[in-house]
Image: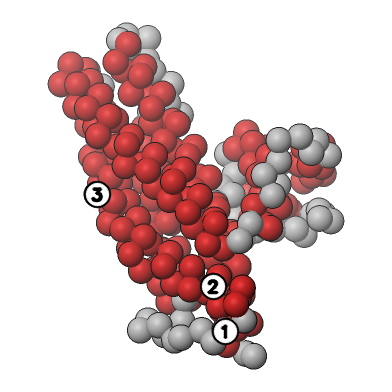
Amino acid sequence: MNINKHTLVSDIVADNYKTAAVFKNHNIDFCCNGNRTITEVSAEKELDWEKLLSEILMTVTDTSHREDYQNWELDFMTDYIYQNHHTYVEKQIPEIQLYLNKICKVHGEKHPELLEIQTLFNESAGDLTKHMKKEELILFPFIKKIAKAKKEQTELAKPPFGSIENPINMMHHEHDDEGERFRKIAALSNNYTPPNDACNSYKVAFSLLKDFEEDLHKHIHLENNILFKRAIETEQTLNNK
C-alpha cells in the first residue's frame, strides 16, 4: 500500500493493524472516525504530519505477526469477529460490572467520577448486547449469504431490508455511540490511571476497562473498515451482474 499524507487513517489500519498502535499513542481515533487523512488528523492533534507519516512507515516495514484481514473471506471474518470479540464482550461485561459495583460502594463518595463511569459502562453493556444480537441474527447471516453467492456464482436474493447498506448504517451509528461513551470513560478515569489511594480492586477494574476499550476499538475497526466495506462492495458487484 502506498501511504502518503492524503491516505485515510482507516485504510492504513485496515491494510496493517499494527499501525493502530501509532494512532493510539497520539489519541487518534482510527475505528469510528478513521475517514480522515494523515494531514487532517495531524492538524486536529497539532502534530507534524511528516513525523506521523514517518512513524507509520517505520511500522509497516516490520511485516512480522501481521494478520492479512483484507484477504479473509467474508464468512470467515464474521465467525472470527463473533468468536474473538462478541464472546469476549459477553464474558467481560459481568466481571467488569462486579468490580465497578464493589469500588463504587467503597470509593464512590471520595471519587464520584466512579459513579459516572459505572453508569456509562452499564449503558454500554446494555446497548452492546442488543447491538451484537442484531449483527448475529440479521447482519452476519446475510453477509454469509453474500459470501456464498460470490463463491458459487449464484444470484443473491434481495433481503427484506433492501440493501446491506441499511443495517450497516445503523451499526455505524451505534459504533459511534460506543466510541463516544468510552472517550468519556477514559477521560473520567484519567486514561485508566488509578489514584494513589486505589485498592487492588480499583486497579483491576481500571485495567479491565482499558482492555475492554482496546478490544472494542479493534472490534469496531474490523467491522467498519474491513468487513462492512467489503460486504457492501461485494453485494453491489453481485447485483450489477
Secondary structure of the residue carrying numbered label 2: helix
Image point (60%, 77%), residue name = 152
Kind of residue indicated by mark 1: Thr
Q: Residues within 10 Å of mark 1 (few under 14, many from 20)?
A: few
Judged from the image, the secondary structure of the residue bearing numbered disc 3 is: helix
Q: Earlier in the sequence, mark 3 or mark 1?
A: 3
The image quadrant of residue 134 is bottom left
What label does residue 27 carry, if any?
none
Q: Nearer the viewer, residue 203 or 92?
A: 92
Residue 64's spot in the image, x, y percent? 76, 34
Evaluate whether residue 194 shows in this view.
Answer: yes
Q: Residue at x 83, y 39 (%)?
A: 61
Q: Residues within 10 Å of mark 3 (few under 14, many from 20)?
A: few
Residue lying at the far bottom in this picture: please name it.
241
Q: Residue 184: in sight, yes or no?
A: no
- How far is the residue under mark 3 from the one under mark 1? 38 Å
Residue at mark 3: 126
Q: Residue at x 55, y 70 (%)?
A: 147
Colouring of the image: secondary structure
Q: Which residue is mark 2?
A: 148
Identify whether 170 is placed above or below 221.
below
Residue 227 image offset from top left, x and y in percent = 55, 61
Residue flagged by tag 3: what amino acid is it? Gly
Tell me residue 172's x, y (percent): 45, 63
Quadrant where the C terminus lies? bottom right
Q: Earlier in the sequence, mark 1 or mark 2?
A: 2
Residue 4 relative to residue 143: left or right: right
> Residue beneath label 1, please?
154
Looking at the image, which residue is at 43% across and 64% down?
Answer: 140
Quadrant where the N terminus sits is bottom right
Judge depth for marks 3 and 2 and give the one in front: 2
Which element carries disc 1, helix, strand or loop?
loop
